[in-house]
């Protein structure tokens, strides 16, 4: 035997799964919703998406190479996912510097200060979004009217008057209820319809408008075993139950469950943001607790809080509990309960 | 050659030996006899490298002819009846040097001696191939089905159990059908088809699949009323008790994508692995790794000149590209390793604790329950060497536990 052969401990086989394969799988799952946003918001959506992804990847590269002085690992695809998700949480009419700041906060503060992929406690894209929401509240909540490729691209305050800015369905309802109107009259007056929510023909951030596209992404990720059902199903289920109880108590004051599911980025959050591997629990039971927690906090913020939308905050709050959940919710150890059946 | 205390050598340089002659006798209870697989002259007694990579005592025999001890019944006629009492059966199994042939090579007479106060209710026969690629149990079930079932009935007698179940994965419908037909003559033996699921061939996993009972952490199968033997062991028991033939050979799978003629061979112990590879068409050009065992739990061999021993269920040749490990990436906490672990452990956590040498916490997180099936490392998208760290941790925690007992 004069040829060198490899000697290493078992196992000698590997599934062939890799981080980049998983990340690009998520990117594919995000495509339908991305195309819908291009369709309804036109050039503005394309510009926001490209700029967000490019800045996230660039910041990841620059910070890893020059500040942390490590081998840059942008090829794992995680910065691309963060970039798309950040864009999905932004309106199409933002000046470039706001997007760049958002990307810097997401990657720089949300991810790399904690040690990079795998170590960040909070979802980086949400850290970026919430930072922008608190710093630029008016710009972040101005959404142009949907006119497809005729939707004006608004880069600075100089032509902001060009756009008729519309509010999101949840915003309209919240405001209207405050001035004493009922849900059904508000829906009618503002031409809000479930079919539009489903197809994406409604105001909002890039990625949150079209329920069908997000659900396509979910089906793809479940089929490819990129994620499991536990988190999305527990969030959606709990929202249906909680808002259903409120709706039955007073249909004039509380929107019905379907309205809550289809609006305000709930599906975007439940399918793509809450399921981030790094910031969600490790066991199925833990994931269900996490999902139920997100749903409860979301509904409480929406119905009783000051913001019309709440899932971003809810996810960040539950992110903080993940270490605790992982510590106390253990998988069922083999042989734990001895069955004598 | 087996798990437990090494055996004591009985022959000297220059002695003539016959096939089946005792070469070394068991030293203590958890030990096993070793018999000569060949006839010829003892050349020397020396240390030799074995498949585990350690030097062990070995008897070197210059092979001459194939002369068997006259006490061994070499006819192929099936001997169905066994009226011996349990003590005599166990004695013969002990004499024949039989150990578990699934891979762990635990001396069989020890398993057959049920600790006081415990009772075995079921005998489970493991027909689940312990790993992918290996097919030695499969061919054995097809070719030696009758002997196997008689062996099972002998084991039942020895254990005084009423029920025996042969568990076979349902991707081997021919073996299931074949054995089902044979067991019609044995009212208390049944064949159960099982889902194909790695690692079903582990003792604890098999008991769970067949009886839906879980062996408690740190416990033995008999704690839930079960005793498990591999199909190969059952055939060896038949040979020993009915034919007076000691354990000198076994079925070994030799396989690999680039091999010209992968096959199963009945191999005498002591045959060099390289001879097997030659028989299967020679070592392929692109060989990257030679593994004693399967892809998940086998040991990579540094030198294919090592001999086949009682625990060698297969030899697997992996081509170059599959042999190298992939580069490790950071843990992305995808929880795949947790969901795949058959023992309900958290491999990602055990690895982190291992890296920080937090052995007490590893113990609390049940590191000792790990059966080293390799599923966690296999499935990790970041190609993290989870099992390497868990193994190290088990060794450290094992030391800790032993020093505590003193
Ligand atoms: S499978 Fe690998 S990446 Fe996933 S949680 Fe386990 S160790 Fe981490
Ligand atoms: S090797 Fe990994 S998957 Fe298998 S039992 Fe051990 S920790 Fe669990």
Image: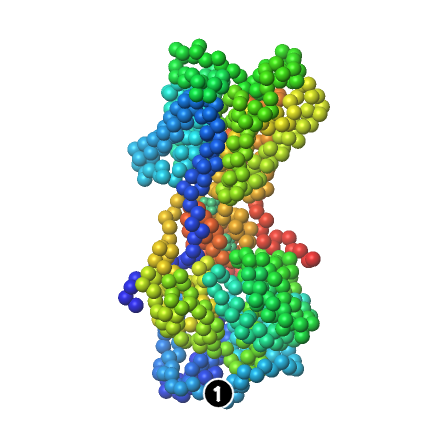
- Seen in the picture, residue B276 relative to A97 is either above or below; the reply is below
Residue B372 in picture, x, y percent from top left? 49, 57
Asked where in the image residue B206 lies, by quadrant, the reply is bottom right
Label 1 element class: loop
Q: Which residue is mark 1?
A: B69
Question: Image point 45% across, 40% down: which residue?
Answer: A25
Question: Image point 66% across, 21% down: which residue?
Answer: A254
Question: Image point 59% across, 49% down: which residue?
Answer: A332
Q: Is residue B291 left or right of residue B363?
A: left
Is any part of residue B40 visible from this angle?
yes
Judging from the image, mark 1 belongs to the subunit labelled: B
Report the number of discs.
1
- Seen in the picture, residue B313 relative to B346 is either above or below; the reply is below
- Seen in the picture, residue B45 relative to B2 is either above or below; the reply is below
Is any part of residue B115 visible from this angle?
no
* In the foreground, B349 or A312: A312
Give the class, few, some or many, for how many residues have Cα within 10 Å of label 1's Cα (few <14, many ≥20).
some
Asked where in the image residue B175 lies, by quadrant, the reply is bottom right
Q: Is residue B307 left or right of residue A245?
A: left
Answer yes or no: disc 1 within 8 Å of ligand 2.
Answer: no
Residue A69 in picture, x, y percent from top left? 31, 36
- Seen in the picture, residue B105 relative to A266 is either above or below; the reply is below
Residue at the extreme left of the image, as rendered: A2
Residue B112 in picture, x, y percent from top left? 60, 72
Question: Image point 66% across, 31% down: which residue?
Answer: A241
């Amino acid at each position: 035997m004069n040829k060198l052969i490899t000697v290493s401990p078992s196992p000698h086989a590997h599934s062939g799964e890799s981080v980049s394969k998983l990340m690009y799988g998520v990117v594919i799952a995000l495509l339908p919703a991305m195309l819908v946003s291009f369709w309804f918001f036109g050039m503005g959506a394309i510009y926001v998406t490209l700029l967000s992804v490019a800045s996230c990847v660039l910041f990841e590269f620059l910070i890893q190479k020059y500040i942390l002085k490590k081998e840059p690992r942008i090829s794992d695809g995680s910065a691309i996912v963060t970039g798309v998700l950040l864009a999905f949480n932004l309106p199409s009419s933002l000046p470039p510097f706001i997007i760049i700041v958002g990307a810097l906060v997401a990657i720089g503060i949300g991810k790399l200060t904690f040690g990079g992929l795998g170590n960040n406690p909070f979802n980086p894209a949400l850290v970026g979004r919430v930072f922008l929401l608190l710093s630029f509240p008016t710009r972040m909540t101005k959404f142009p009217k949907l006119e497809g490729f005729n939707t004006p691209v608004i880069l600075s305050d100089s032509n902001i008057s060009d756009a008729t800015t519309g509010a999101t369905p949840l915003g309209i309802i919240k405001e209207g209820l405050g001035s004493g109107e009922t849900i059904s009259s508000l829906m009618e007056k503002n031409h809000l319809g479930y079919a539009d929510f489903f197809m994406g023909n409604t105001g909002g951030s890039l990625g949150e408008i079209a329920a069908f596209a997000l659900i396509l992404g979910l089906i793809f990720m479940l089929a490819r075993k990129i994620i499991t059902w536990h988190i999305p199903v527990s969030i959606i289920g709990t929202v249906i139950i909680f808002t259903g109880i409120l709706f039955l108590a007073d249909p004039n004051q509380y929107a019905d469950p379907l309205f809550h599911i289809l609006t305000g980025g709930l599906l975007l959050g439940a399918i793509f943001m809450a399921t981030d591997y790094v910031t969600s629990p490790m066991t199925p039971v833990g994931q269900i607790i996490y999902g139920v927690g997100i749903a409860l906090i979301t509904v409480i913020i929406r119905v009783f809080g000051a913001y019309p939308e709440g899932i971003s905050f809810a996810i960040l709050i539950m992110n903080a509990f993940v270490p605790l959940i992982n510590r106390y919710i253990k998988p069922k150890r083999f042989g734990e309960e001895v069955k004598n059946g | 050659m087996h798990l437990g205390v090494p055996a004591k050598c009985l022959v000297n340089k220059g002695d003539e030996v016959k096939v089946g002659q005792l070469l070394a006798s068991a030293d203590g209870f958890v030990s096993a006899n070793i018999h000569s697989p060949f006839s010829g002259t003892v050349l020397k007694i020396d240390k030799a490298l074995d498949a585990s990579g350690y030097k062990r005592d070995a008897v070197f025999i210059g092979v001459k002819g194939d002369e068997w001890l006259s006490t061994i019944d070499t006819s192929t006629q099936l001997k169905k009846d066994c009226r011996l009492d349990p003590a005599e059966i166990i004695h013969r199994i002990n004499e024949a040097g039989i150990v578990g042939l699934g891979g762990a090579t635990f001396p069989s007479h020890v398993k057959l001696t049920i600790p006081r106060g415990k009772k075995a209710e079921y005998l489970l026969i493991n027909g689940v191939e312990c790993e992918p690629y290996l097919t030695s149990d499969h061919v054995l079930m097809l070719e030696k089905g009758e002997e196997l079932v008689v062996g099972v009935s002998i084991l039942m007698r020895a254990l005084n159990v009423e029920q025996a179940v042969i568990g076979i994965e349902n991707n081997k419908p021919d073996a299931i059908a074949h054995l089902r037909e044979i067991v019609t003559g044995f009212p208390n033996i049944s064949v159960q088809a099982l889902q194909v699921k790695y690692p079903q061939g582990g003792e604890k996993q098999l008991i769970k699949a067949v009886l839906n009972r879980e062996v408690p952490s740190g416990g033995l199968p008999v704690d839930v009323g079960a005793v498990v033997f591999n199909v190969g062991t059952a055939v060896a028991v038949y040979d020993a008790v009915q034919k007076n033939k000691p354990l000198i050979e076994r079925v070994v799978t030799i396989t690999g994508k680039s091999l010209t003629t992968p096959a199963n061979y009945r191999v005498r112990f002591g045959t060099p692995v390289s001879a097997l590879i030659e028989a299967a068409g020679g070592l392929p050009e692109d060989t990257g790794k030679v593994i004693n065992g399967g892809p998940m739990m086998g040991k990579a061999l540094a030198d294919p000149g090592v001999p086949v021993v009682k625990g060698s269920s297969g030899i697997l040749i992996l081509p170059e590209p599959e042999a190298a490990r992939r580069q490790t990436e950071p843990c992305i906490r995808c929880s795949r390793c947790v969901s795949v672990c058959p023992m309900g452990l958290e491999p990602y956590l055990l690895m982190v604790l291992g890296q920080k040498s937090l052995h007490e916490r590893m113990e609390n997180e049940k590191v000792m329950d790990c059966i080293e099936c390799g599923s966690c490392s296999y499935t990790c998208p970041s190609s993290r060497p989870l099992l390497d760290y868990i193994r190290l941790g088990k060794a450290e925690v094992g030391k800790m536990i032993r020093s505590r007992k003193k």
